[in-house]
Image (cartoon, grey):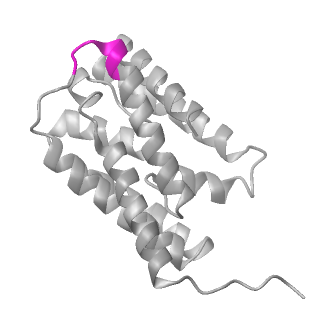
């Protein structure tokens, strides 16, 4: 007989959502990255680049661009994943938008890269461990790797080559290289 899933208790669900909020908060501390023109990868990186080019609110961009990926996640992964991811992305958008006016912690790009990547990696890891996602790229990777001969990590890395290439044209190649270091630092923590 197959393993039966126990219904999640209210206490555990509250704990999961608190942890996803903590993770989204850590990831939202872009005060190391954004003021130094260093971006994150994936859909969040795309949102940051569009924000840089247009001044459209990052939170609105992150939410809108992630919507198709969230619905794909709902259809193929499930309702709990969808709700958890939506909650996490909304928290990321709200928190980052409220922190946007605070001055940078450092203007030294290497420090920003190291500490921004650490916080980002910790935040993403916490959200994933508690059933959500902060970026549609992972959702797309999960869905596509069933049809293409790449792992989720390989797909995300391939996708990010284009994001960091675009960053090189928009922010400059040095900032793109710092962004790649942030990405590497982030994935090393997960």
Q: Nearer the viewer, residue 68 or 134?
A: 134
The answer to whether residue 67 of the structure is visible from this angle is: no
Q: What residue lies at 52% left-to-right and 76% top-to-bottom?
A: 80
Task: Please provide percent x and percent y for residue 93.
Answer: 26, 54
Q: From the image, which quarter does the C terminus lie in? A: top right
Query: Vertically, is 151 above or below 22?
Result: above
* Residue 139 as seen in the image, left or right of residue 50: right
Residue found farthest to the right: 1
Task: Please provide percent x and percent y for residue 59.
Answer: 24, 52
Residue found farthest to the front: 11
Q: From the image, which quarter does the N terminus lie in? A: bottom right
Residue 103: say if magenta.
no
Q: Count the marks.
A: 0
Task: Please provide percent x and percent y for residue 25.
Answer: 31, 49
Q: Which residues are magenta?
A: 106-112
Q: What residue lies at 54% left-to-right and 26% top-to-bottom?
A: 184
Query: Vertically, is 19 above or below 121?
Result: below
Task: Please provide percent x and percent y for residue 65.
Answer: 36, 55
Q: Nearer the viewer, residue 126 or 40?
A: 126
Q: Quadrant of residue 53?
A: top left
Q: Quadrant of residue 18?
A: bottom left
């Amino acid at each position: 007989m197959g393993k039966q899933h126990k219904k999640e208790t209210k206490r555990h669900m509250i704990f999961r959502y608190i942890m996803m909020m903590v993770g989204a908060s850590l990831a939202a501390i872009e005060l190391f990255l954004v003021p130094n023109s260093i971006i994150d990868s994936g859909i969040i990186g795309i949102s940051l680049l569009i924000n840089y080019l247009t001044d459209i609110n990052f939170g609105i961009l992150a939410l809108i661009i992630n919507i198709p990926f969230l619905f794909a996640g709902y259809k193929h992964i499930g309702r709990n994943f969808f709700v958890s991811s939506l909650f996490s992305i909304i928290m990321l958008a709200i928190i980052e938008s409220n922190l946007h006016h605070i001055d940078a912690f450092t203007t030294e790009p290497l420090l920003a890269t190291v500490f921004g990547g650490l916080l980002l990696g910790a935040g993403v890891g916490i959200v994933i461990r508690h059933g959500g996602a902060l970026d549609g790229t992972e959702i797309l990777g999960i869905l596509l790797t069933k049809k293409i001969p790449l792992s989720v990590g390989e797909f995300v890395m391939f996708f990010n080559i284009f994001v960091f290439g675009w960053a090189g044209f928009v922010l400059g190649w040095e900032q793109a290289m710092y962004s790649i270091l942030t990405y590497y630092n982030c994935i090393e923590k997960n």
